[in-house]
Amino acid sequence: MKALSWIVRIIAAIILLQTLFFKFTGAEESIYIFTKVGMEPWGRIGSGIAELIASLLLLIPRTAWLGAFMALGIMAGAIFFHLTTLGVEVMGDEGYLFWLAIVVSVCSIITLVLHRTDIPFLNKRDIN
């Protein structure tokens, strides 16, 4: 289980981290996406910062659950906009960004299941 945890967390973190270059440098595709959903530039930069924090939290075993929650929330937003505003395919990417969001979501769900005992509000312990 420990190996599986590392694998899914690393996959999610790599995907999140590799998209940061495009968000922070103002790549044409990123600007197009966030303009189309009405959140350029603050949504692009804000989601990039959130993805950076989530990816770092995913790589720290004690905070993996928090990174997974963050990543899942961010990806829920991405999937929502793909299904409602953007379409699965964006600028001829054949759905690549959509499927990356699905992969990060699945990895985040697996991380949450594997690290469920680390989630403080689910596992209240007596301090006495």
Image (cartoon, rainbow, N blue to C red):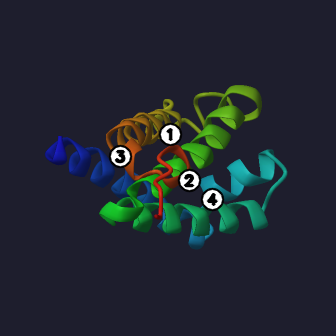
User: What is the quadrant of the N terminus in the image?
Assistant: top left
Name the residue type under label 3.
His
**Mark 1 lies on residue:** 101
Q: Residue furthest right?
A: 38
**Mark 4 lies on residue:** 28
Q: Residue furthest bottom?
A: 25
Seen in the picture, residue 20 relative to 79 is either above or below; the reply is below
Q: Residues within 10 Å of mark 2 (few under 14, many from 20)?
A: many
Chain-order first, disc 3 or disc 4: 4
Chain-order first, disc 3 or disc 1: 1
Distance from label 4 to label 1 (Cα)? 19 Å
Identify the element where label 3 is drawn.
Answer: loop
Distance from label 4 to label 2 (Cα)? 26 Å
Which circle, 3 or 1, is nearer the viewer? 3
Chain-order first, disc 2 or disc 1: 2
Distance from label 3 to label 1 (Cα)? 21 Å
State the residue in front, 51 or 98: 51
Chain-order first, disc 2 or disc 3: 2
